[in-house]
Amino acid sequence: MSSIHFIGNSRSIDVHSPLQVWSASGPIYWSTNKSSLLDSKSPNGIYWSPKYRKRGKRRSKERSEKKRPSPLQSILLLFPISFLASLLFRNRFSSSPIPLPLQMGYIGHHGVATLHKYKYSGVDNSLVAKYILQPFWTRSVTLFPLWMPPNMITLTGFTFLLISALLGYIYSPRLDTAPPRWVHLAHGLLLFLYQTFDAVDGKQARRTNSSSPLGELFDHGCDALACAFEALAFGSSIMCGRYTFFFWVIAAVPFYLATWEHFFTNTLILPVINGPTEGLMLIYVCHFFTFLTGAEWWAQDFRKSIPFLSWIPFVPEIPVYGVVMIFMTLFAVIPTIASNIGNVQKVVASKKGNILSALAMLLPFNALLAGVGIWAYLSPSDIMKNYPHLLVVGTGFAFGFLVGRMILAHLCDEPKGLKTGMCMSLVFLPFAIANALTAKLNEGLPLVDEPLVLLLYCAYTVGLYLHFATSVIHEIKNALGIYCFRITRKEA
């Protein structure tokens, strides 16, 4: 028999088994080792006493007085998380006998039949690629073993850009300070390797007779995400800060329009001067140039950096990167948009279709740009300046989802027109805009801290994209009887 003695009086309680006693600070347990009462929240053991009970009450009162989020704040915080969780796990606990690919619903029976007949068609009119890079790529592909799958080469190339963007974040968190010179050299080399691996993967597929629609989707999906990560690397080289987002837009608009044109023409046509060849070459030449001159060259007034332009009057002070952005928009982006729309219009007219239905497929992308622009304009914490990495990465994955859905629609020969499923990437933006708007109406205080909202935005778009990518890879593998990272086919 054991007895429990309370400090401060002579009373005792006899017990035959361990006894649990509740105090103001939590449960107290009987200790047979020290013949004392130990508080469950104290690893060293504290004797129960009236003094400790008062301290426990005081701590409990302090905890209850801590500020808690209002019900509205809790709902706003949990909505995107619960929505994404329901999307990710909607089939995890399903008892339906329907196979997983059919439950996901990304590819229907018509799409499965079309995948077996799909053949890629593309034309590269670049003279630089034809006479300089293609011979180099042809020799480079022989360095890869025959057992190495093309998708592994694609993923390795994409990893180079992830490393480049990470270096930019480490040495220039807001992309407005100059990193060490060697970082610019690393940016240029990593981008060159990405371009080489991105070109060699297709040659490896033909070399190993493993070309498939999955390879095209995987390759273009990585290229879509590469726009965001290379924009971050380029932003760190030229110290453009908040304008890094606009450089991403300059890269994303031609990419999306080219994908849209491919959807209607069934042939990916690269002009004499195009982004995957001359565009990337220009960027890694800029990285190498910055290695020699320093990032500050891009941030000073263009009339100081380029002496023969010092005579230009009546022009405000514009940094060099601002001039680059203007020239790229006027002489690269706008002509590309006009060419893409013209080519699609010809195809639609030849088939007696409706050009408005074709243009409707551009609405989700325009809504993404408009939504992020409104959010950045209303932002009380200036997310475009203070958190450029999070904003570009979150929007880049939303863009990757839009591109992926359009490429999948092309592979499966889906009807032309607006795809409502593409709008899934836009679900978070109304919440973010509403939260920023409350700051305008509430003396600059949003309902939810904006850095947290931005993190949730990234988590939502990354989760949405990964769900789409893994699901579609799984479906195409099952439909065609192939592997993603192995060359051999599945046994029937």
Image: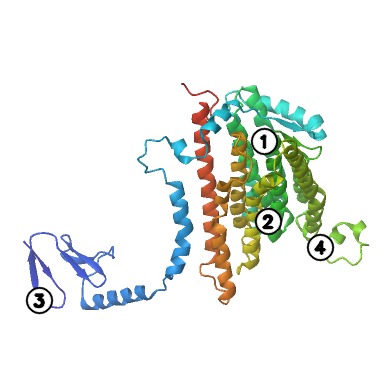
Residue 180 visible in the picture: no
Question: Of discs 2 and 4, which sits in the foreground?
Answer: 2
Which of pointers 2 and 3 lies earlier in the amino acid sequence? 3
Q: Which residue carries the number 4 mark?
A: 318
Residue at the (42%, 73%) spot, across then down: 67
Residue at the (57%, 59%) spot, across then down: 429
Which of pointers 3 and 4 lies earlier in the amino acid sequence? 3
Q: Residues within 10 Å of mark 3 (few under 14, many from 20)?
A: few
Q: Is residue 123 above or below residue 403?
A: above
Q: Which residue carries the number 3 mark?
A: 10
Which of pointers 1 and 3 lies earlier in the amino acid sequence? 3
Distance from Cα at disc 1 to Cα at disc 3: 82 Å
Q: Is residue 421 left or right of residue 492?
A: right
- The image quarter containing residue 52 is bottom left
**Which amino acid type corresponds to the residue marked 2 in the rendered image?**
Phe
Q: Which mark is residue 245?
A: 2
Distance from Cα at disc 2 to Cα at disc 3: 74 Å
Nearest the camera: 156 or 478? 478
Q: Which residue carries the number 1 mark?
A: 198
Nearest the camera: 98 or 321? 98
Q: Position of residue 54 (x, y in %)?
A: 26, 78
**Which amino acid type corresponds to the residue marked 3 in the rendered image?**
Ser
Q: Residues within 10 Å of mark 4 (few under 14, many from 20)?
A: few
Placement of the N terminus among the 4 image quadrants:
bottom left
Q: Are marks 2 and 4 in contact (CB under 8 Å)?
A: no
